[in-house]
């Protein structure tokens, strides 16, 4: 593990990593949610302890098996899945675990089936492809120890609508939990409750399942869903949640019918040398804005790429790669590019269409000023946007959260599974008793769709 981190140039953990990693490694939880601003290292906050726990299992006789992953990582889209896959492949190079990916644009053919049959420890996927693989009996969840929901605020959004898929995936795991919960629970502090403790026979079907949710915002949809399904969930909530990064500079620009002209002037004079993301609210606006900029300036046309749900997956991947590799300096995009994607060195974000709520605002501006870097945001505000923009601007100037949450200000409590641990500054903790999973409807996996949910903006 140390070699893997050194090769990535990681010398010390971030705040959320310092707080989350020990909790996951101790394993005295059944469900955990940790939330912090974008760009704070949440991916490695779950990858590192999950990898370590799976490696520890091997010393107890638990090894890789065909088509039976020991950890699931669920993501809202292919692009985020491929980024998680890239980070996981780096760790697996040093830790020798088998990582596979199922996502939109990856057909479930014989090649994929053979790959899964050759063994899988960690399976990363979008919900639609995972349900299809379950329906085809290409994977089985009998050995799953960890389920990670990355970008949980997106996955539980009433707009994107992944909740039904998640319930179908969770159902067999919940059934397993109910069976094993009838067995005697170990006393508090018993090492048998840790993730690294598994039956020496090599089967982990009777071992506990740990659910981990990570998010950059705690939305009402997410909060209500988790409270219903996981009433005793352990919560690690950052004090900086729902606040803008301190090293972010925001400009507010009033626009009307001159909106296109002001964008062209901005790009041509102020920021064309900067790596820039231009956010639109709809696919139609993305297409129109891209077409306008392409026709307005040959130099701009050579520096533009588009990213939205109306672009075929392979073409979208190509466009995204152009932007990542700095071959395109500006990306015209919808919120498909605002959730979870780690795009290095974005200097400026332009909100060409003002977002419809404060959560979308936080995700969009979170594409810049990441990991301590500085960044600029330019907000185009039309008459219809003034009320929301005024409220957001007022909250920013007062230094208060842009989005309210009942989980803010939670006092830390002692977990019934073990000792009180020392929290890092800026993280508020509530540890669960880990005694119940509630609110799951018994839908099972009937009627699994073979069609990927797009959830696309």
Image (tube, rainbow, N blue to C red):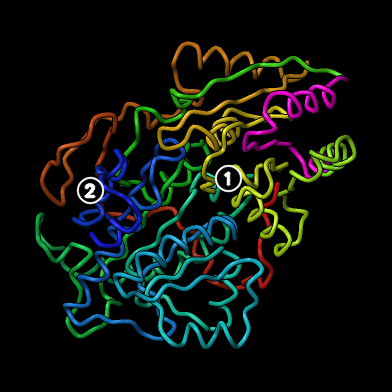
Name the residue that disc number 1 marks.
157
Q: Residue 399 placed where, x, y %?
A: 44, 15
Callout 1: few (<14), some (14-19), or many (20+) C-alpha neighbours within 10 Å?
some
Name the residue that disc number 2 marks.
433
Q: Residue 313 placed where, x, y %?
A: 70, 62
Residue 132 sits above or below residue 431 on the image = below
Question: From the viewer's perspective, is 431 left or right of 370?
Answer: left
Residue 368 sits above or below residue 51 on the image = above
Q: Nearer the viewer, residue 130 or 9?
A: 9
Q: Residue 205 placed where, x, y %?
A: 30, 77
Q: Residue 335 placed where, x, y %?
A: 65, 42
Per the image, label 1 sits on a secondary structure element best described as loop
**Magenta-span inclusion, residue 168:** no
Q: Earlier in the sequence, mark 1 or mark 2?
A: 1
Residue at position x 16%, y 40% in the image: 414
Per the image, label 2 sits on a secondary structure element best described as loop
**Magenta-span inclusion, residue 264:** yes
Residue at position x 26%, y 38% in the image: 430
């Amino acid at each position: 593990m140390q070699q893997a981190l050194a090769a990535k140039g990681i010398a010390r953990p971030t705040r959320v990593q310092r707080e989350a990693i020990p909790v996951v490694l101790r394993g005295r939880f059944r469900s955990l949610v940790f939330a912090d601003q974008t760009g704070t290292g949440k991916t490695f906050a779950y990858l590192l302890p999950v990898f370590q726990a799976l490696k520890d299992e091997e010393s107890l006789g638990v090894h890789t098996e065909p088509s039976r992953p020991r950890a699931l990582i669920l993501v809202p889209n292919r692009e985020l899945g491929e980024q998680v896959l890239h980070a996981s492949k780096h760790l697996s190079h040093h830790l020798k675990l088998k990582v596979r990916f199922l996502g939109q644009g990856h057909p479930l053919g014989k090649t994929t089936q053979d790959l899964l049959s050759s063994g899988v420890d960690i399976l990363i996927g979008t919900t639609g492809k995972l349900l299809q693989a379950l329906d085809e009996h290409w994977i089985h969840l009998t050995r799953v120890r960890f389920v990670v929901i990355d970008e949980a605020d997106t996955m539980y959004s009433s707009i994107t609508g992944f909740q039904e898929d998640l319930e179908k995936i969770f159902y067999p795991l919940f059934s397993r939990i109910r069976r094993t919960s009838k067995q005697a629970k170990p006393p508090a502090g018993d090492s048998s409750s840790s993730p690294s403790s598994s039956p020496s026979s090599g089967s982990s079907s009777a071992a506990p399942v740990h659910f981990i949710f990570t998010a950059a915002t705690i939305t009402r949809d997410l909060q209500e869903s988790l409270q219903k399904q996981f009433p005793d969930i352990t919560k690690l909530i950052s004090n900086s949640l729902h606040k803008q990064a301190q090293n972010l500079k925001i400009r507010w620009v009033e626009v009307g019918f001159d909106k296109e002209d002001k964008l062209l002037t901005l790009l041509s004079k102020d920021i064309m040398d900067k790596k820039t993301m231009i956010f639109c609210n709809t696919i139609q606006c993305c297409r129109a804005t891209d077409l306008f900029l392409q026709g307005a300036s040959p130099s701009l046309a050579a520096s533009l790429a588009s990213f939205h749900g109306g672009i075929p997956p392979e073409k979208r991947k190509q466009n995204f790669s152009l932007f990542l590799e700095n071959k395109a300096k500006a990306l015209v995009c919808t919120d498909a590019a605002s959730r979870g994607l780690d795009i290095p060195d974005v200097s400026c974000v332009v909100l060409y269409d003002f977002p419809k709520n404060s959560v979308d605002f936080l995700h969009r501006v979170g594409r810049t000023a990441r990991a301590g870097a500085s960044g600029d945001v330019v907000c185009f505000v039309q008459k219809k946007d003034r009320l929301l923009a005024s409220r957001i601007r007022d909250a920013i100037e007062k230094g208060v959260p842009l989005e309210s949450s009942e989980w803010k200000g939670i006092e830390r409590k002692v977990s019934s599974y073990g000792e009180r641990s020392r929290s890092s500054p800026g993280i508020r903790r509530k540890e669960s008793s880990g005694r119940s999973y509630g609110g799951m409807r018994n839908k099972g996996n009937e009627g699994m769709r073979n069609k990927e949910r797009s959830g696309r903006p």
